[in-house]
Image (cartoon, rainbow, N blue to C red):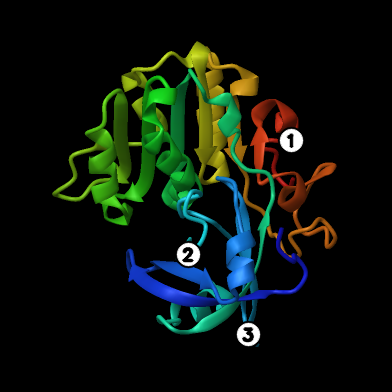
Amino acid sequence: MTERGIPMQVEVVERVQESPTVFTLQLRLIEEAQRDAYRFDPGQFNMLYLYGVGEVPISIDGDPDRPELLQHTIREVGRVSGGLARLQPGDRLGLRGPFGRGWPMERLDGRDVLIVTGGLGCAPVLPVIARLMRQRERYRRVAILQGVKHSDDLIWRERYDEWARLPDTQVLLAADVAGPQWHGAVGLVTTLFERLDIDLANSTTMMCGPEPMMVAASRELLQRGAGEDDIWLSMERNMQCAVGHCGHCQYGEKFICRDGPVFPYREIAALFGQRGV
């Protein structure tokens, strides 16, 4: 267990520019005792603290079986993320975590698994996919669906190709707007449901991305036979303290940082998709 109130020091080991606005930082805890103690579940997040600038919540998208290297993929959208974008190997920053409820890995054994993501929503499910592929014999069919606004926005293309070569693994990609070299579907990610080769009545779905996409996808999956307890969603809100004290991420009676960010559909169905919530 790590100290959650005081940021631990981490060092940038590697930096990768994934696209013009998206970059990945691979981090390592400086203190050996903290590095040995640190563990995370797929779907949890860290708070990254840039000294003198501020702190932001970022999903951990590295391999949960290699917790000594912490990977975070970040879109440059504001002051803190802009500062993080300028970090280089050897630079140091602060880290608190891990926080939140992760994906229900214990519910996946012996079932079909459907992963539906949009935009940078692919990052929070990377730890899930890493474990699925390493322990492939424990699961039945796996389908990975990713949607982007423009085909040029798709990152990690080589990973999708690698996953698609594995047995009983279906990878389907969609772009609202397609460039000349695009070989995936054109349209919303929900248009890919017609091509699914899994049993939705005996599957667990994990979904992350823009909330309108998740609302539409959840409703369509329910109509196609998925159960309310078998659809899990990673929600995004303005998380500032990560422990449910500041109230910025309140979602009805729940707090995204403390009670989520992953929720079963049934638990939030009454609030899901409501404007202003």
Residue 210, image x, y percentages: 53, 46
- SS at mark 2? strand
Q: Quadrant of residue 42?
A: top right
* Disc 3 target residue: 51
**Comparing labels 3 and 2, the label whose residue is closer to the camera:** 3
The residue positioned 76% from the left and 64% from the top of the image is 241
Is tag 1's residue or tag 3's residue first in the polypeptide sequence?
A: 3
Marker disc for residue 74? 2
Can residue 255 be seen at all in this image of the molecule?
yes
- What is the x, y in percent for residue 179? 20, 50
Can residue 76 be seen here?
Answer: no
> What amino acid is found at the position of numbered circle 3 in the picture?
Tyr
Q: Residue 233 or 180: which is nearer the viewer? A: 233
Label located before the other in sequence (2 or 1): 2
Nearest the viewer among 219 and 24 is 24
At 45% from the left and 51% from the top, the residue drawn is 63
Residue type indicated by callout 2: Ile
Q: Nearer the viewer, mark 2 or mark 1?
A: 2
Q: Which residue is mark 1?
A: 271
The residue carrying pointer 3 sits among few (fewer than 14), some (14 to 19) or many (20 or more) residues within 10 Å by Cα, namely: few
Q: Which amino acid, mark 1? A: Leu
**Where, quadrant-wise, is the C terminus in this rendering?**
top right
Q: How far apart are the alpha carbons under marks 1 and 3?
A: 36 Å
Indicate whether 243 appears above or below 92.
above
Q: Position of residue 71 (x, y in %)?
A: 47, 61
Q: Along the horizontal axis of the image, is 232 left or right of 116?
A: right
Label 1's element? loop
Q: In the displayed structure, would residue 167 be above or below residue 274?
A: above
